[in-house]
Amino acid sequence: MLASETAKQILIVDRDIATVEPLRQKLAEAGFTVRAITDGSAAVASVAERPPHLLIIDWNVPGYAGLDLIERLRKVRSPQAVRLIILSDLSDDEHVVSGLNLGADDYITKPFFLREVVARVCVLLRTHSHDTNHLALCCDDLVLEAATNRVAVRGKLMHLRGVEYRLLEFLMSNAGRTFNRAQLLSRVWGGDTEVDERTVDVNVQRLRKILSERGCEARIQTVRGFGYRFAPAGNTE
């Protein structure tokens, strides 16, 4: 499959050319437009100039240590929700949880199978069935545009990370329904991802904080003893 002008944009940031090039080729064959950078500072500049739909970042790249690059990239304002996959030689629970809690959508350890990475990328950048990718989810003044991954309140854009966007999209799509942590992990993070249920609480609180800045904090409600739900339009009690 050949990439088109409307293909999803992916940026790979990895110090290891031997890893980057085969992955870049496989993703390009799958229909994505792929850029590759081996330097952290160049990655920050690239994202600021042309935000991708997905970042694939190695745990350590020149100029940055550990999760410093991810922290820096989080501060780059983007009009769309950018998904994030961490690649790492470190497979212990502490590093995996740290990466996911920082906002990564997925954590893949090296060495990996190229087909598996491509499959996970396709899940994160999934296209909506039929014409739903052209529709918007609306709740009073809050609007989520699925086609562009943009969220706005009274016309002003909100800058969300990939996990925050996907969590809001799922809850808005199921307004009024309550989901426990396990259900949210399965539907938002993916059933095959090793994520602690506390990660749900952390990301809900982060999303609430962002919504509160626009007067929408009451939209995401806690159902004591069960989980969370998104309040339907006109109902924030």
Image (cartoon, rainbow, N blue to C red):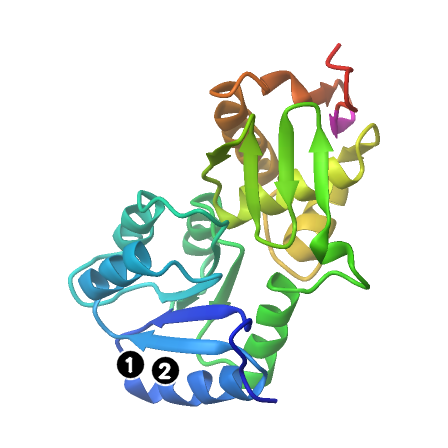
18 shown above or below 65: below
Q: Nearer the viewer, residue 55 or 205?
A: 55
Q: Nearer the viewer, residue 173 or 148?
A: 148
Describe residue 230's horizontal placement relative to residue 27 as left or right: right
Local secondary structure at mark 2: helix
Marks 2 and 1 close (CB-CB < 8 Å): yes
Quadrant for residue 38, please give it: bottom left
Report the residue at 58% width, 19% height from top: 217
Residues packed near mark 1 inside 10 Å, few (<14), some (14 to 19) or many (20 plus) = few
Cα distance between the residues tagged 2 and 1: 6 Å
Q: Find disc 1 in the rendering and name its residue.
A: 16
Can you tell which mark lies on residue 65? Answer: none
Three-letter code for the amino acid on which mark 1 is drawn: Asp
Describe residue 97's horizontal placement relative to residue 67 as left or right: right
Quadrant for residue 126, please give it: bottom right
Local secondary structure at mark 1: loop
Which residue ends up furthest to the left in the rendered image?
Answer: 63
x then y, percent, for residue 15: 26, 75
Can you tell which mark lies on residue 20? Answer: 2
Q: Is residue 48 visible?
A: yes
Report the residue at 68% width, 47% height from top: 185
Which residue ends up furthest to the top in the rendered image?
Answer: 237
Q: Which residues are magenta?
A: 226-230
